[in-house]
Image: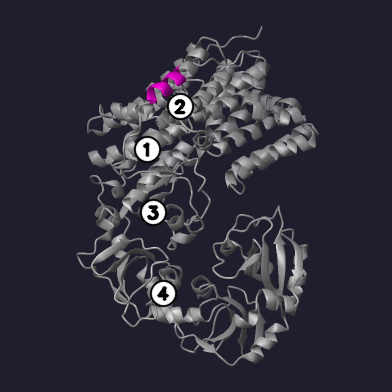
């Protein structure tokens, strides 16, 4: 084994580890692979960047636009709904019709788009027929994967064909996949309808007819977390806005409605001024609200200059700039362990020439931000050694007084001996979460600890030097004045009125919201709705919804005015599962979109243009003729997939040029070669099918193609049969939810667990394997190379 081959194998191993661990985004891993190959000279710069101009890559992003055009004009929706009328009410026929429809559409559209299009339709059918969505959604996902095996339009099929062309072969035509793919689709659907569906879970959560608003409340347990807070006539809250009251930020509660004088205002804004006698319908954990009362006995020590002066000698402040390549960029201040990692605290953020000093928890960090930080003097002086920071400027007392005025923000809290927070840690005391307080020092038994760690336990008699606003403690004491009523009057039904509606939604596989927290997204200000609950793999996620980091496949319960929620139907980040009685799509341009797609197919079939050129021309006409806007076209493209493929293609080329692919092919031949060529093809198929559980299918095909080409070349046979087998094996990725975005998409709405994919995915994979091995030799017999 040469050094170059060893380097390629090492790079491949590192890539696989990163793909499996998800420590780094898959598309970023691919770009790092590209950069390494180009920088190391393993491939030329032309080869390294050729992925972005590769015909398969161009075709793939063009097909995203073509699929979106069919969806936006309502063409695919019309076909799907018309065919659904044939299903009846029995589970078997329903599953069959859903799978046939999805498979046919996926043969000519992007399979992610087909899954997203038909997901709400399938859920609606489940509600009307009293079937669990878990009985329909996995068959839907698998049907889109099966349908993708029938034509050249499928991503893996395009990459396989392009690899053949790069190796000097003719490549596959548009319908060359159809004979084998058609057999796979027919056998796969028959297996699921006759046997496989009995392996699916019957999630009790999903039973019942079309879910009412009351049913949604019961399903998510909201009826147990809804109560009324009454504002007394003489409350300190009277005259303050809802935002100033800090009711939401300090308690983690959602204000569902404000009741005043017999009228109801759903989802009141932060600017709404409270009056005596107001009733606030709140949702959240009432025990968490009551838990705040234990902080009410904290005592402000008015005379504490000695402690302040002791700390001032050991505490410094500095302005630091976030470096461009810092790992902190895009993180929320709340989620960066500044105290434990750097032994500092962030007390301000400077943007546009001014400092923000309060409510810093959910401020995202940007490159170039100037942070005002606090820490022990020797620690602050050493911050320059961290790559995350640059331009560390320790503030003089005069500059500090001008920027921050710490004397006005520092005070001392004493913890009484019998306080409810004795024995808890600083972190669990919620002082930082509730009040935005920063504990700069802890004084206990004549011992001073500056910048105590968040896991430091509190004891009775402790003195805490705190930075914040002392007036915030008055807010806490005001909370105790509020009257709690858990028995709601019958005339208060805000959740069941048309003015405030609950809907279930999931993230689109191409959503930009994945990986961000609920609090960071600020649903109230951004969309005019609230996230009432988040479900993942069939169970609620976390007790504090604000901290939940969303993933594709999550099931969101959204709460808001009916008209506002209807606007989300046009938002490409969401797929609304609960029907809102929306207007049917404008189908006037559906025939035009269908004609454009038919033109693309016809031009490829007749040889007028290769599929890459035909697809890009068709995508251009979709926009030019108004089937969708250019902005919608940009958002339709799954750029993560494009960068993943374009970044990994050079690795496939490196495997070919360095001899790594030939080396692996030699190992395959040494193990299976004596058993004959079809045994080798079977081995390659099985290896590919197993790898789909951990490797993205697009990257897998790029890696397998050179291995297959080298193996078949070494045996003296044309590579088309083996390449066809690998294409089907990669497309039929049934055994894992992470193997394909379509599988992830249905995971939340179906309430599936990882093991559910194994239960039906493994048998279906075996059935498809047998089908391929039976029909492939007859459709694509082995042909010796010249």
Q: Which residue is mark 1?
A: 119
User: What residue appears at the point 28 percent right and 62 percent down from the top-left corner?
Assistant: 223
Per the rendering, the mark at residue 323 is none
Which quadrant would residue 252 be assigned to in this image? Answer: bottom left
Identify whether 546 is placed above or below 152.
below
| Inter-mark Cα distance, 3 to 4 | 38 Å
Checking the image for residue 240, the label placed there is 4
* Contact, mark 2 vs mark 4 (Cβ under 8 Å): no
Q: CA distance from mark 2 to mark 3?
A: 33 Å
Please report the bounds of the magenta region as a residue range.
589-598
Q: Is residue 297 left or right of residue 210?
A: right
Asked if marks 2 and 1 touch (Cβ < 8 Å), the reply is no
Q: Report the Cα–Cα distance between label 1 and label 3.
A: 20 Å
Q: Which of 233 and 702 lies nearest the eye of the viewer?
A: 233
- Quarter occupied by residue 42: top right
**Residue in the picture at 70% in, 31% down:** 49
The answer to whether residue 731 is left or right of residue 409 is left
Indicate which disc, 1 or 4, sits on the residue closer to the N terminus. 1
Q: Vertically, is 299 above or below 672?
A: below
* Label 2 secondary element: loop
Q: Residue furthest top?
A: 786
Q: Nearer the viewer, mark 1 or mark 3?
A: 1
Distance between the alpha carbons at the discs numbered 1 and 4 = 45 Å
Q: CA distance from mark 2 to mark 1?
A: 15 Å
Q: Earlier in the sequence, mark 2 or mark 4?
A: 2
The label number, if any, that marks residue 539 in the structure image: 3
Q: Is residue 113 magenta?
A: no
User: In this figure, which residue is indicated by the disc labeled 2?
Assistant: 109
Mark nearer the viewer, 2 or 4: 4
- Looking at the image, is mark 2 or mark 3 earlier in the sequence? 2
The x, y position of residue 603, in whole percent, is: 51, 13
**Quarter occupied by the N terminus:** top right
């Amino acid at each position: 084994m040469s050094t170059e081959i060893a380097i390629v194998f090492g790079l491949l191993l590192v890539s696989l580890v990163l793909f499996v661990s998800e420590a780094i985004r898959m598309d970023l891993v691919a770009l790092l692979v590209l950069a390494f190959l180009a920088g190391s000279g393993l491939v030329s710069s032309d080869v390294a960047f050729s992925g972005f101009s590769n015909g398969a890559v161009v075709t793939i992003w063009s097909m995203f636009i073509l699929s979106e055009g069919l969806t936006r004009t309502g063409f695919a929706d019309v076909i799907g709904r018309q065919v659904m009328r044939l299903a009846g009410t029995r589970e078997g026929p329903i599953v069959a019709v859903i799978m046939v429809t999805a498979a046919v559409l996926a043969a000519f559209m992007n399979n992610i788009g087909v899954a997203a299009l038909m997901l709400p339709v399938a859920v609606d059918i489940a509600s009307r027929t009293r079937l669990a969505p878990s009985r329909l959604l996995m068959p839907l996902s698998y049907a889109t994967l099966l349908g993708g095996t029938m034509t050249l339009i499928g991503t893996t099929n395009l990459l396989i064909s392009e690899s053949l062309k790069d190796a000097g072969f003719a490549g596959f035509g548009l319908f060359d996949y159809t004979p084998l793919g058609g057999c796979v689709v027919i056998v796969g659907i028959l297996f699921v309808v006759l046997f496989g569906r009995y392996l699916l879970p019957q999630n009790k959560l999903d039973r019942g007819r079309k879910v009412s608003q009351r049913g949604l409340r019961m399903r998510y347990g909201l009826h147990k977390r809804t109560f009324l807070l009454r504002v007394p006539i003489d409350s300190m809250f009277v005259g303050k806005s809802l935002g100033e009251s800090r009711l939401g930020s300090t308690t983690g509660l959602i204000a569902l409605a404000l009741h005043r004088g017999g009228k109801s205002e759903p989802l009141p804004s932060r600017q709404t001024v409270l009056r005596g006698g107001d009733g606030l319908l709140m949702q959240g954990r009432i025990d968490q609200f009551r838990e705040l009362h234990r902080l009410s006995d904290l005592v402000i020590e008015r005379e504490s200059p000695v402690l302040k002066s002791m700390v001032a000698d050991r505490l410094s402040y500095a302005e630091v700039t976030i470096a461009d390549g810092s790992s902190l960029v895009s993180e929320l201040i709340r989620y960066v362990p500044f105290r434990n990692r750097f032994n500092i605290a962030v007390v301000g953020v400077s943007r546009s020439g001014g400092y923000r000093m309060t409510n810093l928890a959910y401020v995202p960090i940007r490159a170039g931000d100037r942070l005002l930080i606090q820490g022990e003097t020797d620690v602050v002086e050493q911050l320059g050694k961290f790559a995350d920071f640059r331009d560390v400027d320790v503030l003089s007392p005069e500059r500090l007084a001008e920027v921050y005025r710490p004397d006005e923000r520092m005070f001392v809290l004493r913890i009484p001996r019998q306080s409810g927070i004795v024995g808890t840690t600083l972190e669990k005391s919620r002082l930082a979460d509730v009040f935005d307080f920063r504990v700069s020092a802890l004084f206990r038994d004549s011992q001073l600890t500056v910048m105590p760690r968040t896991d430091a336990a509190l004891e009775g008699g402790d003195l805490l030097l705190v930075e914040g606003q002392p007036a915030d403690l008055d807010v806490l004491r005001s909370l105790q004045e509020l009257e709690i009523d858990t028995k709601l009057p019958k005339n208060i039904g805000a959740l069941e009125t048309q003015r405030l509606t609950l809907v279930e939604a999931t993230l689109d596989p191409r959503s930009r919201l994945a990986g961000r927290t609920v609090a960071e997204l600020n649903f109230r200000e951004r969309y005019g709705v609230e996230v009432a609950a988040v479900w993942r793999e069939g169970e609620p996620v976390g007790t504090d919804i604000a901290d939940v980091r969303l993933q594709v496949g999550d099931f969101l319960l959204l709460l808001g005015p009916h008209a506002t929620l209807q606007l989300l139907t046009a938002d490409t980040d969401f797929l609304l599962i609960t029907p809102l009685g929306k207007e049917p799509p404008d189908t006037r341009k559906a025939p035009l979109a269908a004609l454009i797609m038919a033109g693309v197919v016809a031009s490829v079939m007749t040889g007028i243009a290769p599929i890459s050129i035909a697809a890009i021309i068709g995508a251009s006409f979709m926009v030019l003729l108004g089937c969708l806007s250019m902005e919608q076209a940009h958002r339709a493209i799954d750029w993560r997939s494009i960068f993943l493929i374009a970044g990994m293609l050079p690795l496939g080329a490196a495997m070919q040029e360095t001899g790594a692919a030939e080396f692996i092919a030699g190992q395959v031949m040494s193990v299976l070669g004596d058993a004959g060529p079809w045994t080798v093809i079977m081995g390659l198929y099985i290896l590919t099918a197993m790898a789909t559980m951990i490797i993205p299918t697009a990257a897998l095909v790029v890696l397998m193609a050179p291995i297959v080409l080298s193996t078949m070349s070494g045996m003296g046979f044309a590579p088309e049969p083996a390449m066809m087998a690998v294409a089907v094996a990669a497309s039929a990725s049934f055994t894992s939810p992470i193997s394909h975005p379509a599988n992830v998409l249905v995971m939340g709405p179906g309430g599936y667990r990882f093991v559910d994919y194994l239960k039906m995915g493994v048998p279906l994979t075996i059935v498809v394997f047998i089908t391929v091995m039976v029909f492939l030799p007859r459709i694509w017999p082995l042909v010796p190379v010249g």
